[in-house]
Amino acid sequence: MSYTVSQLLNQDISLQPIEIKGWVRTFRANRFIALNDGSTLNNIQCVVDFENTDETILKRITAGAAVHIQGELIESQGKGQRVEIKVSTIKILGDSDPETYPIQPKKHTFEFLRKNAHLRTRTNTFSAVMRLRSSLSFAVHKYFNDNGFNHVHTPIITGSDAEGAGEMFRVSALDPKNLPLDDHGNINYKDDFFGKETNLTVSGQLEAETFAMSLGKVYTFGPTFRAENSNTSRHLAEFWMIEPEVAFMDLAGNMDLAEDFMKSVLSYVLEHNREDLEFLEQRLLDEEKTKPQAERSDMSLIEKIKFVVDNNFKRVSYTEAIEILKNSKPNKKKKFNYIIEEWGADLQSEHERFLVEKHFKCPVILFDYPATIKAFYMRLNEDGKTVRAMDILFPGIGEMVGGSQREERLDVLKEKMKALDISEEELWWYLDLRKFGTAVHSGFGLGFERLVMFATGMGNIRDVIPYPRTPQNAEF
């Protein structure tokens, strides 16, 4: 019977006979194969009787080669492992040229591995990251399924800009060398495939709202796109968004949902991915030793995750947060890169992290932001200056979740759209929700890659997605 490395490392040695398939990590002394199949961080040692094995086979056992091994699971004769495989037969399934195979058994830079992203999951770091990504994805779906949500596949191609940012990728079937023009010299999109200007979506929220107003509790979890020409460690052109929307739920309920959700998915990986977390925690500790003391984190990776899971989230209004920041030592001594001087300022990551890590010492939910720095669809408060928005702030990363109670009043929403020059004609269907059975409803958005960064401790968002899409880079 064929087993995985993970199964064999946890099996009783009475299990006989066994067979296994995987990739060679190392082959030393013409005898010891370290075999890995991606099921676990750990390799299993396979001991070859080299005196009775064809020399041509031995020469083909190289790093990266795929092999099929049959043998006995025995108690290990050496240190470092409980069990090992005494090989009876070995078959080379796929050769790997040791002169050209990029993933040699040595330390590689992350930049080098990004250039070899098709093979980087053969390293311990990236196999751990991608197993955690998979577990987090499952935990997201499990949470919503267990709590009565319907999963909605919102469109990737859209005619609306949910965020109003305008940084969207155009979708067109027009011939770029022969564009049809209207009487004003503009591109005539009526001749295009969809008969109108269309783009890749930046958010599934608006469409999800339509389903919430009939199905009650829904969520979308899909790819989103932003044509922001930003080459930083926190930006991608293609990323995944988790966006629940719930009818008859106000801002307080939205905060309750988001907190419970975040604690649930992070608890799941604490329980199911301990081995990978401990490996990534040690990697992070080793990396931090190379940094100046002032730049090192106060908490280890697992401590940060438990910090979120074990603490109640502190709820603070934007107005109160601004006063705290204005009177803080870093602000008064001009240690912040962005000095807080007045109400209405858009908070930066350094301010958010100060509130979480230094002032409150727990995750923080900020709410009731100035309307001028938030999106058109957020419900206007009675003061006319703030909206029922909320952001959840985590240690080490700042904003993790952004959400709001949506504006359910037709007249107010139309006024806000007019002030921001958002076409009623384009969003007629969105306005219809406010005409036919409107009700209080809320939701939030969570960038999945940001969650994976937090759970893995990886410092660059390009290292938590299989194939990153960034300016000047669409490789693989």
Image (tube, rainbow, N blue to C red):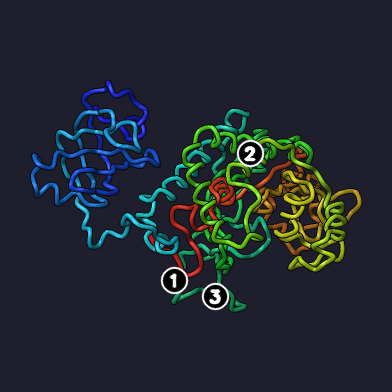
Residue 355, compared with residue 313, is above or below; it is below
Q: Which of 424 and 333 is in front in this view?
A: 333
The residue located at (70%, 59%) in the rendering is 349
Residue 390 seen anywhere in this rendered image of the structure? yes
Residue 59, compared with residue 314, is above or below; it is below
- Total number of numbered labels? 3
Q: Position of residue 7 (x, y in %)?
A: 35, 30
Circle 2 is placed at which residue position? 306
Instruction: Tell me the tag on residue 175.
Output: 1
Amino acid marked by disc 3: Leu
Amino acid marked by disc 2: Lys
Q: Is residue 285 left or right of residue 88?
A: right
Q: Is residue 79 left or right of residue 57?
A: right
Instruction: Tell me the tag on residue 181.
Output: 3
Q: Position of residue 203 (x, y in %)?
A: 61, 52
Q: How far apart are marks 2 and 1 (CA)?
A: 54 Å
